[in-house]
Image (tube, rainbow, N blue to C red):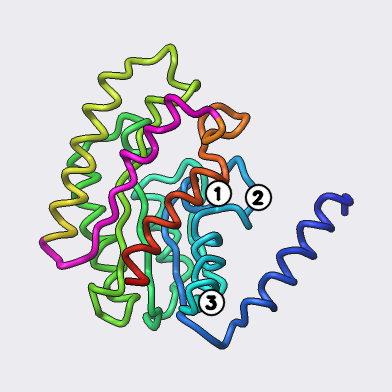
Amino acid sequence: MSKRLLIFSLVSFITAISLGQDNGVSFLALGDSYTVGTGESKINSWPLQLVYLSRKKNFPIQFPKIIAKAGWTTTNLLEAIEAEQPKPNYDLVTLLIGVNNQYQGKDIQIFKKEFLILLNKSIDLAKGNPKNVFVLSIPDWSVTPFARFKNKKKIVKELGAYNAIIKKESKKHEVPFIEITQISRNAAVNTSLITSDGLHPSKKMYKLWAKKVGKKLFK
C-alpha cells in the first residue's frame, strides 16, 4: 500500500469514527462524479462537506453511504442501486444525476423515464417521505476548460431541458429541489472552482453546493 493511500485510508477511518455512525441523521447520496467528488479526495466531496457543516449547525448528519461513480448515467445508477439493495430507512437521501446522459448523447426520453424511477426509489429509501429527499440540478460544465472546443450553446440548451424535467418532477412529487446550476457557472470567472483536470469541481465549488443544500436542510 502506498504512503498516500495509507494516509487516505487512515483519514477516512478517523472521519467515520469521529462522525459517529449511530448518531445523527442517516444519509444516502445517489449520483455520479459530482457526488463522489471526482477530481478531489472524498472528504472534499459535497456530501462530506455537508456532514462537516451539519456539525457546526448542531444538526449532526452521519457519515453518508454514497452510491455514485464517475461516468454514471441514470441507467448505471439504477443498476447500482439494484445491486446494492440499500435499506429504505434513511433520514436524508440526495439525488444528483443526468450530466452523463447529456454528455453521452442519450435520448432525453430515457432520462425522463429513468429519472422518475430514481426519484420514486429515492422517496422509498427515505422512509417513504418525499420531504426527506433533496434533488440537485445538473451543473453547467460548458463553463469549464474541458468544454472550450465544444458547442457550448448546445450544452447549455440540453442541460436546460434536463433540468426542466428534474425540477418539474421534483415539484410534482413534492420533493425539495436545490438549484446549483447557476453556482456552477461561477467557474467561468473563477478557475479555483475547477480541479486540475479542467472539468470537475474543486472543494471550493463543492463547499458552495453543500452550503446551498444546508441552507434548505437546516432552516
Instruction: Give the labeled residue for mark 2.
Output: 41
* Element class at badge 3: loop
Mark 1 touches mark 3? (CB < 8 Å): no
Q: Is residue 181 magenta?
A: yes
- Quarter of the image holding residue 48? bottom right
Return the disc, 1 or 3, that comes first in the chain's sequence.
Answer: 1
Most extreme residue toward the left, as rendered? 172
> Amino acid under label 1?
Gly
- Please, which residue is most extreme toward the top here? 149
Q: Is residue 205 above or below residue 92?
A: above
- Structural crowding at the residue carrying mark 3, measured as other residues with C-alpha within 10 Å and reported as few (<14), some (14–19) or many (≥20): many
Q: Nearer the viewer, residue 158 or 217?
A: 217
Mark 1 touches mark 2? (CB < 8 Å)? yes
From mark 1 to mark 2, how far is it between C-alphas?
Answer: 7 Å
Q: Amino acid at mark 2?
A: Ser
Q: Position of residue 154 (x, y in %)?
A: 26, 21
Q: Which residues are magenta?
A: 172-191
Q: As drawn, is 49 to the left or to the right of 28?
A: right
Q: Earlier in the sequence, mark 3 or mark 2?
A: 2
Mark 3, residue position: 62
Q: CA distance from mark 3 to mark 2?
A: 18 Å
In this rendering, the answer to whether 148 lies above or below 64 is: above
- The image shows residue 163, relative to residue 123, as above or below, that is above
Q: Residue at x 54, y 74 (%)?
A: 55
Neighbourhood count class around disc 2 (C-alpha, 10 Å): few under 14, some 14–19, many 20 upward: few
In terms of depth relative to the viewer, which is nearer, 198 or 80? 198
Q: Which mark is residue 37?
A: 1
